[in-house]
Image (cartoon, coloured by chain):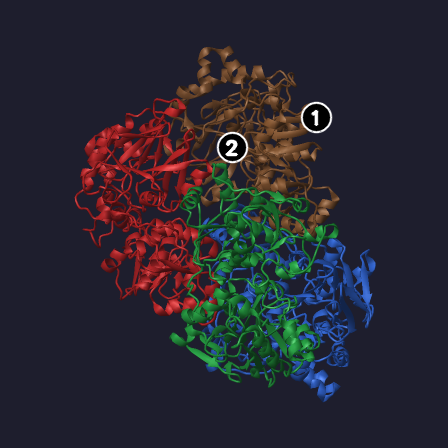
Chain colours: A green, B red, C blue, D brown
Amino acid sequence: MLFRQFFDPKLAQYAYLVGCQQTGEAVIIDPERDIDRYVEAAESEGLRIVAVAETHIHADFLSGAREFAHQYGTRTYLSDEGGDEWASDWARTEEYDVTFLKDGDSFHIGGIEIQALHTPGHTPEHISFVLIDRGGGASTPIGVATGDFVFVGDLGRPDLLEQAAGMHGVQEPSARQLFASLPRFTELQDYVQVWPAHGAGSTCGKDLGAVPQTTVGYEKLYNASLSVADQGEDAFVDAILAGQPEPQTYFARMKRDNNKGVPILGQLPSPRRLTVAELQRRVDSGEALFLDTRLDRSGFMAKHIPGALYAPMNRAFNTAVGSLVEDETQAIVLIIEESAVEEAVRDLVRIGYDNIVGFVTPETLTRYFDKGGKAGKVEEVGFDAVAEARLRSDVEVVDVRFASEYAGAHIPGALSASYTRLPSLAPERLPKDRTLLVHCGTGARAAAATAFLVREGYDVRFVNGSFDAYKEDGEIETGSFKGEPQEPAAV
Amino acid sequence: MLFRQFFDPKLAQYAYLVGCQQTGEAVIIDPERDIDRYVEAAESEGLRIVAVAETHIHADFLSGAREFAHQYGTRTYLSDEGGDEWASDWARTEEYDVTFLKDGDSFHIGGIEIQALHTPGHTPEHISFVLIDRGGGASTPIGVATGDFVFVGDLGRPDLLEQAAGMHGVQEPSARQLFASLPRFTELQDYVQVWPAHGAGSTCGKDLGAVPQTTVGYEKLYNASLSVADQGEDAFVDAILAGQPEPQTYFARMKRDNNKGVPILGQLPSPRRLTVAELQRRVDSGEALFLDTRLDRSGFMAKHIPGALYAPMNRAFNTAVGSLVEDETQAIVLIIEESAVEEAVRDLVRIGYDNIVGFVTPETLTRYFDKGGKAGKVEEVGFDAVAEARLRSDVEVVDVRFASEYAGAHIPGALSASYTRLPSLAPERLPKDRTLLVHCGTGARAAAATAFLVREGYDVRFVNGSFDAYKEDGEIETGSFKGEPQEPAAV
Amino acid sequence: MLFRQFFDPKLAQYAYLVGCQQTGEAVIIDPERDIDRYVEAAESEGLRIVAVAETHIHADFLSGAREFAHQYGTRTYLSDEGGDEWASDWARTEEYDVTFLKDGDSFHIGGIEIQALHTPGHTPEHISFVLIDRGGGASTPIGVATGDFVFVGDLGRPDLLEQAAGMHGVQEPSARQLFASLPRFTELQDYVQVWPAHGAGSTCGKDLGAVPQTTVGYEKLYNASLSVADQGEDAFVDAILAGQPEPQTYFARMKRDNNKGVPILGQLPSPRRLTVAELQRRVDSGEALFLDTRLDRSGFMAKHIPGALYAPMNRAFNTAVGSLVEDETQAIVLIIEESAVEEAVRDLVRIGYDNIVGFVTPETLTRYFDKGGKAGKVEEVGFDAVAEARLRSDVEVVDVRFASEYAGAHIPGALSASYTRLPSLAPERLPKDRTLLVHCGTGARAAAATAFLVREGYDVRFVNGSFDAYKEDGEIETGSFKGEPQEPAAV
Amino acid sequence: MLFRQFFDPKLAQYAYLVGCQQTGEAVIIDPERDIDRYVEAAESEGLRIVAVAETHIHADFLSGAREFAHQYGTRTYLSDEGGDEWASDWARTEEYDVTFLKDGDSFHIGGIEIQALHTPGHTPEHISFVLIDRGGGASTPIGVATGDFVFVGDLGRPDLLEQAAGMHGVQEPSARQLFASLPRFTELQDYVQVWPAHGAGSTCGKDLGAVPQTTVGYEKLYNASLSVADQGEDAFVDAILAGQPEPQTYFARMKRDNNKGVPILGQLPSPRRLTVAELQRRVDSGEALFLDTRLDRSGFMAKHIPGALYAPMNRAFNTAVGSLVEDETQAIVLIIEESAVEEAVRDLVRIGYDNIVGFVTPETLTRYFDKGGKAGKVEEVGFDAVAEARLRSDVEVVDVRFASEYAGAHIPGALSASYTRLPSLAPERLPKDRTLLVHCGTGARAAAATAFLVREGYDVRFVNGSFDAYKEDGEIETGSFKGEPQEPAAV
């Protein structure tokens, strides 16, 4: 048996390649949408991917299952549990080779047996895959791919459908389902390896560890969420629903597309490098969105294309784009080093932005400005300016960290508006007739938020600096934001 | 004034960027079809290309004039001389900003005056551009862009329309037109710089120097073809028509497209890197042509995808492809290092092959064969085998050098079939019931020819070695090939 | 806790980065010598590597421990068990911050406790590291880094010191030590993760799985070597010593250097790209060894620099070089694509070849031969030629697969000479006055062996083809090679 | 004959490759120090460089002549004119194959004759090379390599030795020598091509055109400096010495090294990519100079390593470094994208900075600052701040454009200190007890000057903006700077 874990550090997502070397066949579990790299990895091991298996309908990225089916005719294994609402409609209506699995069903990849366990909670249809290496002489499981059911140190959140997909009233029943699913995990042998779909950095759970995999026995001892179950169902439900980070608003779109059918990609978009003249035409036409990915946020603030959004090429890239660009069909022009284009394109198509029409290198951008191209500029200040601002009536301090962080500690009087929900929160909470001092914990998230707010017509100053340092001397208070108490994400 | 020469070493083609720094405007003369690099070069000098000027309707590459007009709305300057047959139909029927120039007309780019001289011969509509740097204080020419009229050490061949475009009976009248055009050149001041459209390696002339530019006075003294004019028109006509290399057969297609309208490229094709699985599907479907560009011809002969053509990434790449791939809409898969893909794509679109659907790296190819992918193999022999073969009745020696080279010296009994004309010559001259020993001067051209003939069903051995070395000892004879005396290219 | 596994697919080697996010500190376990990538990986996670820990004195690669100590002043944790012979002399004589660990000793990296278990067998000083994530709230182990003690599905071989380092009479006592160490593993909790130092492809064990990690409980059930222990010590000793592949001869050198002190690298060698002229001078001087890394073995056989060794850039690259280049100070010139140079350099320094003075691209090589550079050529034949050859007295068939493969099935009369031991076996077993037909299972290993034998003055034909295919029809016999019964590796 | 011009856009320098295809030999005229690219270019044309010829002892870059002689044993042709002071000492004292040429001497490269013309003025030993393509059938020159004697539209400045090399009292005699040399040029045939050693952007002449080459006849008509000669020697001398830009101060060092012997390079420096930890150690040790090459000057001002110099990777890169880094043995760490490292290294070694010990990518720099690395910051202001500042006594406006630009138009009261001479001018002219507002024409040169002055302990504000725009409204005066009337460069 060959086993390989694929990690997408930006989405904190794990896919798994499992192959039987005797037959040369392999299955890929929970692939992302740009599938070429899985195929190449398999081929470099002498394997052919003959099957795709999905633990559930993902909310945080677009699945590669339909792409595999379409491009390679790969067999697809999907859940047949959980009811009609999330039934992978595409796979039921199109002519692909799909097998729907009920709890207890199994299939084989060469000498490897793969059994489906129905483990609802995160979603109703969620299944886990138990692997038995029969070809290697085993009769008990080597591991279990748990999807968003059990993570390293945590459980998959049962509130996501309500928080992200707008399904009201489902989070408590889901939490109770999750409670009921726990024995499916704890009854496995202690030595069974646990392969989750997410790692540290994902908002699909609360407290995910930075160890890429774990074991059943270890989680039974040390998984914090699992431990609460010992206190009974109600205590478990209360605990699991408390303090979850706000999911990104684009999760609803991911859910829908993964259910209805992710558009076929075929080939990665290959945006062209724009000349200064082409950039000028793009600016003039106003049709494309400029997405500036430079790491240097001060450089962005000092000089950027007016109207550009800011999403530096770090781990929050997808989160920033997915949260702040509401229309996934929007034509996008990247500001980016040529060597990073492929990475950015992969990141974008994984959350459904396929219309990437061009890119501009920092060098061309400099040339553009030097030739007189119009530049936007945002004033950058430090936390000392925030302190002063509190005394003035024409200024508001805006805190774009998660509501949970805000609740933990914030500047008195600051408005809360998580940057992952700005498109909906800004019109509700932020005034256009005052100057906004936008801060986060370090400046990273505030920079993306600043660009968004400027584009929306707000008068903004960008606060670049460490909230932790400020906290040491500055006045601080705790508690949730009161501006919109009815908003679930701010609970 | 800013002046920059662009050289395409494979097509031996020169384009010229001429700009006025006072106004920031520039003109590009005789651009190829992938125009982005001209725009970027201009921008890096702070210039904007506002005009394209063409000396004539090119036969050896696709012009970038229509691409500029379409993408940038660039003004176009074309010849209004030479009659209806080659009148740049596209420019007369479409809504572009085109100015047709008669002999003596001029236009300005900032402070630079550009005058059209009608200089027919190579083609009827051919014009040259005389440049006067008035903004730099000059009142006499600094240089002349001579297109295919005067080269360094040679003149543009007047037989190309007949030889390549199939227009019978025009080469002698063209030669006489060329004779009549010569004074337009010789009357210019000696000190005028001469900027031709081709350099060493092009088949648009006979004996082009490897010095990129020259002067009027120097050519008047030392240009071989020009010197013959002193002996009178008839002697000139005889001389200029003698010994020209066979033009590539794809020249007719270039002429037609440049006249009717080169398809808009928009963006360079971006072929995808194929996995082994995708390669297998491509092989199975049989729809795409595999174009193997590895430099190592022995490696190709030892193992290649059955049916693949061979065109190594050297200076003859376009010539080989243009000569041997008759259908320019053919879907093409390249065998190539990833780092060379862009170069190959540019080469291909310059001669009209836009349908480049994928590429396979040598590493993937090896993996494919290691996984059992079917491989073609051609036996490789040396010139010693050629000597032996002459005694056997079931073998023919095939010489794929130019007919002019064959005429200079060849192996007794060898069949002549220039590799640039193989698609038409092979059925006429080469037997399918005997083994062909295919040679050229070094093995380079014979390798491309071998792959073509194998694909066409011939029984071929590839001769890898030096004809010059063979000549020292082997039996040699001279004279044209007698197999097809009526064939003009073999004259 | 942050955990990251590093895999070197050529050496099938795993290193481990374990960090405490609370303090930002990390330890690296069993690093290779080019340490920059560990440092960068740690930094990208916001960690600083403050410690290096080694499970044992490695035989198959050069350790990066001394490099860390020298460059960064990193603390080093080494075994204090096993006696004087392998006591990490460098660490005892130089002024580095080294802690020697006895069985039961432990140290901390932030909140992570790391305990040393003395687990001799593979080597006398071997220790394993048990990790407890106390900062994460655990009081029992999360995992154990087992070095070359327990692999996935196998145990570390106890015969390596004898087979590779020339220490006679130690393999049986070592096997008994290994037997005695087993309870240290089996007494751990079932759920403990097992992180070995090698995976599939390494010759440090017999039957290593292609699953990168395992658990104590699973190995207790399914590890083949471990299971034999149930039959008692003697049965275990017999089984563990049987059928091990011949270790590479360079293992002795690795052992010595890791013990005495690996030379400080400082910076990766940066070989220069040679021009044709420089290549010619290198050829003329005869001082450098040409190492041809082209994947295409037929291309190599058809044309190569006379005297060049052949080691294609695949997973056997280090093995081929380490086995066939005896002098690690030898000046080396690579034949390689520029894009692969860094990878090759890393591979080479990991086994001690630091004197990489230049590289030649395939394109330059072609140019060199085209300019008349002298080329070597080896005739390539198929297995049909092998069948014929058996009838002739002037030809010997040479099988360069492992002795264990030879013992399983070989061509009657074939000489056995594993390509990993050719420098010593060739003079003993292979005649210079006959033609050698050199084969392996596919052609891959035979190609490297062929180049070596040609360089040594043998008359060689290269057999390119599948031994498995041959076996279906051809005559086959089994049993060990009789030529040198006293040679331990052939047992 | 093959002819190829090499352009270094940063030094505006031309080298020439001239080869005879019949013999395969070539000469390189005025090569820079990183000679590999000339060798590769020649080889790609099938040529071997057998000779180096130098027009004079260069002041603006290090010659590659000694490198060729040392690495390849290439023959060297140098001037034997001009006296002992600049006699190429290295070539007279070392065992290389050197031929010293007197006026009228000639040598051959295959069929090409190359004659030396003594053409002093720019320097006493200066020679030009007249080329006759005898192999191509010519008996008169095809071109002349004029070095720094005649440029396109200008003449080489005769004041450089005095201005840059500190030789007092030589500029007028040199100007008279130049006058005497003019007939050597004007007596050549009008049609002769003129190949100068510099183009637009060089400070070796005043008004160099952006046309890469010219002809004798055209220059006789339109070369401004040459035209003045018609008014007699004295008028010529006055005119040629007026208004020359200040040469860089490093020119003196270039002269000296080119005369005494440029250090052998052997191989291009290959600086290592620094990790954050290594960067921190470099910062702590204080030994290396950080050279920040980011194009975004606002980004630099916002955040940079304290003490870093700023030299963006544009055409002024060498000028900035050569002018502001006085010690050429200084250990340098670059802040640069990895893809630009080779270009920067070539630029630096061409002016003698070989000690390039490492580089830091912008991404690593960001990580460094995010981890708490100390950052420098300079306040950036616009020209409006300059206008205000003039009213304040604690502020000085510093104009770092050339003295000639200052003389043409400057802000009243501004101090003049050309950025190319800051190391010597700053201590003389700029006060440490006031705030300096540093401006140039656009911000580009002021940025480099700002970083230098901050490093030297001045209190600086960086003025980013267009002086031309300011001039339209702001108060302006003309005339030379009065602060240091005795300083020749300010004349």
Q: Report whether D95 appears left or right of A361.
A: right
Neighbor class of circle 1 (other Cα within 10 Å; few <14, some 14-19, many 20+) is some
Q: Earlier in the sequence, mark 2 or mark 1?
A: 2
Vertical order, D164 against C272 (above or below): above
Q: Position of residue C484 (x, y in %)?
A: 65, 76
Chain for mark 1? D
Q: Nearer the viewer, residue D268 or B32?
A: B32
The mark found on residue D431 in the picture is 1
Vertical order, D189 against B29 (above or below): above
Amino acid found under the numbered disc labelled 2: Ala
The mark found on residue D12 in the picture is 2
Chain for mark 2? D
Q: Nearer the viewer, residue B410 or D359?
A: D359
Residue located 69% across and 57% down the image: A409
Describe the element under mark 2 as helix, strand or loop: loop
Which quadrant holds residue B194?
A: top left
Q: Is residue A198 visible?
A: yes
Which quadrant holds residue D386?
A: top right
Describe the element under mark 1 as helix, strand or loop: loop
